[in-house]
Amino acid sequence: MMNDGEKYQQVMCDFIESLGIAIIPKRLDHPTFLPGLDLGPNCIYLDAEKMQYPGDLLHEAGHLAVTTAAQRAAVGSDALELPWPTDGEEIAAVLWSYAAAVHLGVPLEVVFHDSGYKNDSAWLIDNFSRGQYIGLPLLQWMGLCFDEQQAAMHKTRAFPTMQKWLRD
């Protein structure tokens, strides 16, 4: 029987690829931070046999999305400027993945599963559900979205609506 993550996996993959981030099936024989997933230049390598949590796709896509275009193209190579991701980019990737889950109608528990986020998944879901968006000023600074005040000034919708999905 298919679990919730597997039900939404194709929706997440289609969305990620629509952003210009390729998802490349690849056998991953080396240790990776998240089982079955690794990042490369503008891509996510996916080992379907080893992936445990399909919602991790959105988090990994978030890392690429909040990275500058030049850095995104260098991921997985010696040209990547370190440290990467920075602590700020990590926070931004978490919030980006929340916005993507909302946009796609993916249950938050699929992305913020109990085995991830340093045991803070429930805390993140609770905060996001109450409109407490840790990292929102950073996503706004990156030009990806607006808080309530900026959205009103621009006559558009506030976060979690994104103005664009990839950082320039």
Image: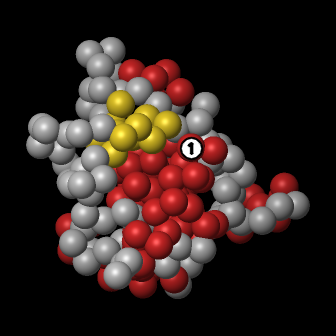
Q: Quadrant of residue 27?
A: top left
Residue farthest top in this picture: 79
Q: Farthest residue in the right direction?
A: 155
Total numbered labels: 1
Q: Residue at x 51, y 53 (%)?
A: 13
Q: Is residue 11 something that shows in the picture?
A: yes
Residue 35, image quadrant: bottom left
According to the picture, the residue beneath numbered tag 1 turns out to be 17
Q: Image height check: is 104 above or below 75?
A: below
Residue 97 visible here = no
The C terminus is located in which quarter? top right
The chosen color scheme is secondary structure
On screen, residue 44 versus residue 167, left or right, reads left
Q: Which residue is drawn at 63% across and 44% down?
A: 18
Q: Position of residue 126 (x, y in %)?
A: 42, 84
What is the quadrant of the N terminus in the image?
Answer: bottom left
Q: Position of residue 85 (x, y in %)?
A: 32, 39
Asked whether 68 or 50 is in front, the reply is 50
Mark 1 surroundings: few (<14), some (14-19) or many (≥20) residues within 10 A: some
Q: Where is residue 135 in the image (x, y as percent from the top left)?
A: 47, 59
Residue nearest the viewer, comparing 29 with 135:
29
Q: What residue type is labelled 1?
A: Glu
Of helix, strand and loop, which one carries label 1?
Answer: helix
> What residue is at 47 percent from the left and 73 percent from the top?
7
